[in-house]
Amino acid sequence: MAFASEVTVLGDSITYEIADTIKKFTLKDVGFVETKNGNYSLDRSLDPTSPYNASYKLKIMVNTDLSGFKMSTTTGNGLAKVNIFKTEDTKESVEQFRFVMQNLIDRGVFKIKD
């Protein structure tokens, strides 16, 4: 999967794009880790009760020059993409996803595409 300037997670109705205000130090402040290739990676559990019980994960990768990113929701082991918006059983995971994304929007990492 190539880096894109705007991404929609599988099943979501909202498209996110990189904000003009994105900075490398902000990525590190919100939990992104720099990979050996120079990209920035974030893996967050979408389990609202415990960050250690990862039934679903949010995975985000931002490229080195901060011009593109990849984003997906996956199974707990991170190997398969999952649509958390499909059933009512994953309502809490969707709420946690919205919370994490709103935090990244508030910090100037992403914005919602008009």
Image: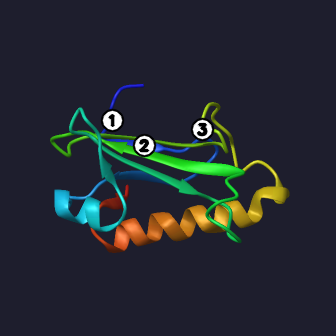
* Amino acid residing under circle 2: Val
Asked if residue 21 shows in the view, the reply is: no
Residue 46 is situated, as x and y percent measured from the top left of the image, at: 63, 59
The reply to whether the C-beta atoms of the residues labelled 1 and 3 are less than 8 Å apart is no
> Which comes before the other along the chain, label 2 or label 3?
2
Q: Which residue is mark 2?
A: 7
Asked if residue 93 shows in the view, the reply is: yes
Number of other residues with Cα within 10 Å of mark 2, as a class: few under 14, some 14 to 19, many 20 or more = some
* Amino acid residing under circle 1: Ala
State which quadrant residue 62 falls in: top left
Number of other residues with Cα within 10 Å of mark 1, as a class: few under 14, some 14 to 19, many 20 or more = some
Residue 9 is situated, as x and y percent measured from the top left of the image, at: 54, 44
Q: Which residue is mark 1?
A: 4
- The disc placed on residue 78 is 3
The reply to whether the C-beta atoms of the residues labelled 1 and 2 are less than 8 Å apart is yes
Residue 6 is situated, as x and y percent measured from the top left of the image, at: 36, 43
Tag 3, which secondary structure?
A: loop
Viewer-proximal residue, 36 or 66?
36
Q: Residue at x 36, y 67 (%)?
A: 105
Q: Which marked residue is nearer to the observer: mark 1 or mark 3?
A: 3
Q: Is residue 26 above or below residue 18?
A: below
- The disc placed on residue 44 is none
Q: Is residue 46 above or below residue 63?
A: below
**Image quarter hosting the C terminus:** bottom left
> Which comes before the other along the chain, label 1 or label 3?
1
Q: How did the renderer colour the structure?
A: rainbow
Measured in 3D between alpha carbons, the distance from the residue under mark 2 to the one under mark 3, in whole angstroms, is: 18 Å
Q: Residue at x 67, y 50 (%)?
A: 56
Tag 1, which secondary structure?
A: loop
